[in-house]
Image (cartoon, rainbow, N blue to C red):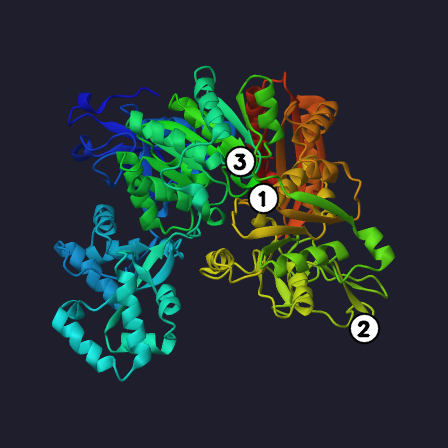
Amino acid sequence: MESFENDIFTERETLFVEVILPLSLAKNYTYRVPFDLNDQVEIGKRVVVQFGKHKIYTALIRNITSIPPAAYEAKYIIDVVDNEPVVTPVQLKFWTWMTQYYMCNEGDVMSAALPASLKLASETILILREELNEDIALTEKEEIIIAALKKQQKLTVNDVSKLLGQKTIYPIINTLLDKELILVAEEVVQKYKPLLKSFILLNDFYLEEDNLRQLFEVLERAPKQLDALLAYLKLNKSGVPISKEQLLAESDCGPAALKALTDKEIFVVMKRPVSRLSNHDDEFNVNFTLNEGQQKAFEKIKSSFEEKDVVLLHGVTASGKTQVYIKLIEEIIQQSDGQVLFLLPEIALTTQIVERIKRYFGNSIGVYHSKFNNSERVEIWNKVRTGAYKVVLGARSAVFLPFKDLKLIVVDEEHESSYKQQDPAPRYQARDAAIYLAHLYQTKVILGSATPSLESYYNALQGKYALVEMKERFGGVQLPNQQVVSIAEENKKKTMVSYFSSVLIKDIDEALAKKEQIVLFQNRRGYATILICATCGYTPKCVNCDVSLTYHKSSGKLHCHYCGYYQSSVNICPACGSVHVEQKGFGTERIEEELKLLYPDVTIARLDMDSTRTKNGLQQILTDFQEKKTDILIGTQMVAKGLDFDNLNLIGVINADTILGYPDFRAYERSFQLLAQVAGRAGRRNDQGNVCIQTYDAGHRIIKQVVENDYIGMYNDEIAERERFSYPPFSRMIFLYLKHKDSNVIDHASATLANILKGKFGKRVLGPEQPLVSRVRNLYIKQIIIKADKHTAIQKVKDVLRETLTEFNATKDFKSVITQLDIDPY
């Protein structure tokens, strides 16, 4: 399609714009531009359009042309929303690549990329902000909207259109969003909260000497309050803010005296955000210098960048990779006006890295992830676009930000499965997408991990990436002492105490005696993973999914972890009436209960999906552990992700077999990564940590390799298996899922499609097969796998596959079948 630069358009020329709608459409739609808007349209700006009979959307201009669409008569755009483009040309190139590579629609990418506030539609709900600034000047129409919202609490975009009697209301709504007077309803999500701490200030009135003298006289009759005041004046000489805890410790006055002084307005309590890092985190001073190993890695990364665009930094846990990243970022910011993207697998679980980097780079850093509300996300979006943010810390969605001048991308913990988007489309892998994004900006990428993915390590050994290694822990601290305990042997000797071996119990006792903290890892949440009737074998299953229900003691109900369905627990078998219903398997909830029976005086907390559902649940659990309020933390794989606690000395893996036995070609690799990362949390400061791994198969290859910290051995074994059976990186995989509410329809559809594909791709097509869970949310699922070796032209495969699916979906019998593609599903 021929494009034109804006400045050559004459005012009376008939223009058409190809737009991306935030909908999953196979093709972009074209609209006609009214003459009076000719000079306002520009690629990357948003326009208001009507799509369908009544719905209004904000769409994004993809292209401008003077050629009308041949298939239909173009409708007029209603208005132009922006004064300048909100999406850059590089972003649009990135969207095009993602659409083609991950076989999705451009509207899917737009929906994933843009914050909700930039995708207004006619049904979008607007509400007033709680803290309303009444001093902001408003136009007459803005005043009408605000007045209506004060009365009705919420309005849809359609309601605003009727209220003002006009269709062109998006620019007005946009202005109200910019003035921070209204919110889009989707924005009302609990935002990522800083840790707030209470600090004590003396009322300004008592800063005058005479007033302070009189105060001393008054407080002579209240000695505890006088002690608090004297302690405050003593601490205040240091010029450092005085926390509530400090004052209580210094004065020994007691909370009642402090409350009395606050009630009398002698003291003022201020809440201030503070770092979640411990105060004695000497390892990470702002003006740190790299040790010898870090300096070598730093220099080698810089020299490698002269030849390669991607460097894999393979450093053991606690080797100080973050400090190397920071030195590289610092150098880039000092030498140029460029920007750095720092990707983390899950922002909420890597608070400590966020705090460290924020502490170092201050206001020039932005954090971008789903825990922020959309107003904040738009603000970050604009600051990245204008270059105000030099460093952006983000989860996978941060690859979509409009960088002005990107100079470096860091992908920390590059092996993490969290970088892969599962649902909805685009089902992209952020690590791979980041490498392509760097190519568009002609910049460099660092992939960092203690346990790299096999694909990345293979690419490094093949010379596609440079490889830099850090083999020693920071400060010379030894890797943790790891011991493997056979559950089978302990059961034989009758030395198991509930789910804990005698070795683990001894380790826990020793750690508690030294006032050290403990993390216990069990990769199953809930209380009992399955209920089963001992008489007839009946097991309660989800009504919507083909899975057994998990018993949660906290709710007293059976829960489905796929669709959220729950029901009351079963005490009498509904099939045979037997009362012998047994609980099999165990999750974090059961471990917590058993541990509380063994250690009633110890503070125990649980970190899993269930315990972190509340607003600040996750941060509170981590903060309490950081501040040593919790002695033992029990968790699922959440505990493996980037946590760094100075007093943590013992890690216990309750049952390693739960992850080793998963039916997936990556199971052993993932097991090694997870166990090694969990073990790496122990002893990260001065002492060598301890790790106790309980398993039924103590001689398992992966367990031995974890204990010996033998990544290379694991890699060599796994890569040989992969090559033998033609799995990635020796092949490319595409998973095709078919879903339908009728099992007969899905059987017929999947068999038909598989036969068509086998006719085109031959033995590369496997299936159709039932996946591990064959029904979710009342939809039956069948899976077809396309496995193309390295020599197959993968883009040609995708082109044929897209064409085949278009024809298949248009077939009368299969129109109702949902088809989903997952490219590189690992």
Q: Which residue is mark 2?
A: 579
Q: Quadrant of residue 672?
A: top right
Secondary structure of the residue carrying numbered label 1: loop
Who's the residue at 71% across and 30% down the image?
A: 766
Residue kind at label 2, given as amino acid type: Val
Which residue is disc 1 drawn over? 816
Viewer-nearest of discs 1 and 2: 2
**Is 796 drawn above or below residue 779 in the view shown?**
above
Neighbour class for label 2 at 10 Å: few (<14), some, many (≥20)?
Answer: some
Q: Which residue is mark 3?
A: 319
**Quarter of the view holding residue 454:** top right
- The answer to whether residue 103 of the structure is visible from this angle is no
Q: Position of residue 586 (x, y in %)?
A: 71, 59
- From the viewer's perspective, is 163 left or right of 579? left
Horizontal side of residue 112 vs 556, given as left or right: left
In the image, is 584 to the left or to the right of 295?
right
Secondary structure under tag 3 reads: loop
Label 1 amino acid? Ser
Which one is in front, 188 or 595? 595
Mark closest to the chain's N terminus, 1 or 2: 2
Q: CA distance from mark 3 to mark 1?
A: 53 Å
User: Could you tell me which residue is drawn at 36 percent across and 44 percent down?
Assistant: 359
